[in-house]
Amino acid sequence: MNEPSTYEPMLIVMKPSATAREVGAVVEIIEAIGFRAHPMPGATRTAIGITGNKGPIDGRRFENLPGVAEVIRVTKPYKLVTRDLRPDKTIVRAGDAAIGGEELAIIAGPCAIENRDQALAVARIVQQSGARFFRGCVWKARTSPYTFQGLGDEGWEILTEIREAFGLKIVTEALDEAGVDLVEQHGDVIQIGARNMQNYSLLKCAGRSRLPVLLKRGMAATLEEWLLAAEYIMAEGNYNVVLCERGVRTFAQHTRNTLDLASVPAVRRLSHLPVLVDPSHGTGAAYMVTPMARASVAVGADGLMIEVHNQPDRALSDGAQALTPEQYLSLVAEAHAIRGVARSIINQSPSATPSPGLVTAA
């Protein structure tokens, strides 16, 4: 028999009836030949991605193993984020809170932790809104070295107090590998900011963490570059990745960035990872945040990241895009109402073919 002239990356799809022992046996064989196995259980079957190969893989060696349904050649540059590996949408959990499930996830809070009174006042509003996640950065990656860089070590103490007092899950940014360790001690979700989306050593470090990772899209990143950044994290074994669209840099001058809402259904078509939208950074203007948040939910976003400040005019960073508590509470109510309408439309029209965005809003 002639050997195939070309080989491509492989996904091993197990039969729905495959046992845990059969899945484990395939994983053992993959690892025994020097590759890394990534089993991804789904609703009906398990798929196993293969990484770490330095050369081509002959998938025929796996085809006759017990429990294997088929071996798929992957033509995309990524193989762990793709729906080929996992047709079912991933639900990322942080304790008893989730992103990607039935509930619209809301991550809200100030751009930066400025002081205890400010942070606790905003956390109280976030809890009142029913949101499960509080955002607030201890260190800030700022364009200018002369602007507020974050509160530093005192900020970790404040975040710990918020977590204990309000029961909120803490989402905060890691700027470097040491920051990942600190988020693991004091937080619940590691945020990788837009400027670090292609900081590959940081992505690998986050990929070795036990915490979920929220990966923001880079300021000029294509969809493929964004997904490949997520692939870096998952290739290290951390499959709990959430994508966050936050706008890209264009020639437009009426907004801080151009919020690319088309990325939501585009990501949904390609990947099983949940996707959020950050209309605060995406527009840079408070009056635009609520309208774009409404649109984000309508196109199928799994949640929103919203900047809130008890005194936006006195904020030390990004005050122009921060909502007041009253504006924020109104936004949350509207977002949930739109989510409900989208679900109602889908439930009433089971024979229709909704858009990819609305399908995931169900």
Image (cartoon, helix red, strand yellow):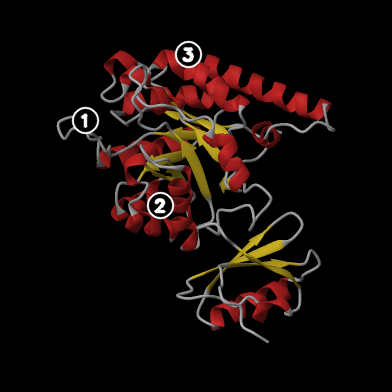
> Which kind of residue does numbered mark 1 sit on?
Phe
Please tell me whether mark 2 sits on a helix, a strand or a loop.
helix
- Indicate which disc residue 327 carries: 3
User: Relative to the observer, which residue lies in front, 8 or 296?
Assistant: 8
Answer few, some or many: residues within 10 Å of disc 2's Cα (few below 14, many 20 plus, some between 14 and 19): some
Please tell me whether mark 3 sits on a helix, a strand or a loop.
helix
Q: Is residue 205 left or right of residue 28?
A: left
> Which kind of residue does numbered mark 3 sit on?
Gln
Can see residue 25?
A: no
x and y percent of residue 109 in the render?
42, 28
Classify 173 as above or below 358. Answer: below
User: Based on the displayed image, in which of its 4 quarters is residue 252 positioned?
Assistant: top left
- Indicate which disc residue 148 carries: 1
Report how far apart the C-alphas of labels 2 and 3 lie in the structure.
Answer: 32 Å
Can see residue 330?
A: yes
Report how far apart the C-alphas of labels 3 and 1 lie in the structure.
Answer: 25 Å
* Quadrant occupied by the C terminus: top right
Answer few, some or many: residues within 10 Å of disc 3's Cα (few below 14, many 20 plus, some between 14 and 19): some
* Residue beneath disc 2: 184
Report how far apart the C-alphas of labels 1 and 2 lie in the structure.
Answer: 24 Å
Q: Residue at x 53, y 17 (%)?
A: 331
Disc 1 or disc 2, which is closer to the eye? Answer: 1
Disc 2 or disc 3, which is closer to the eye? Answer: 3
Q: Is residue 76 left or right of residue 135?
A: right
> Which kind of residue does numbered mark 2 sit on?
Glu
Classify 290 as above or below 193. Answer: above
x and y percent of residue 344 in the render?
76, 24
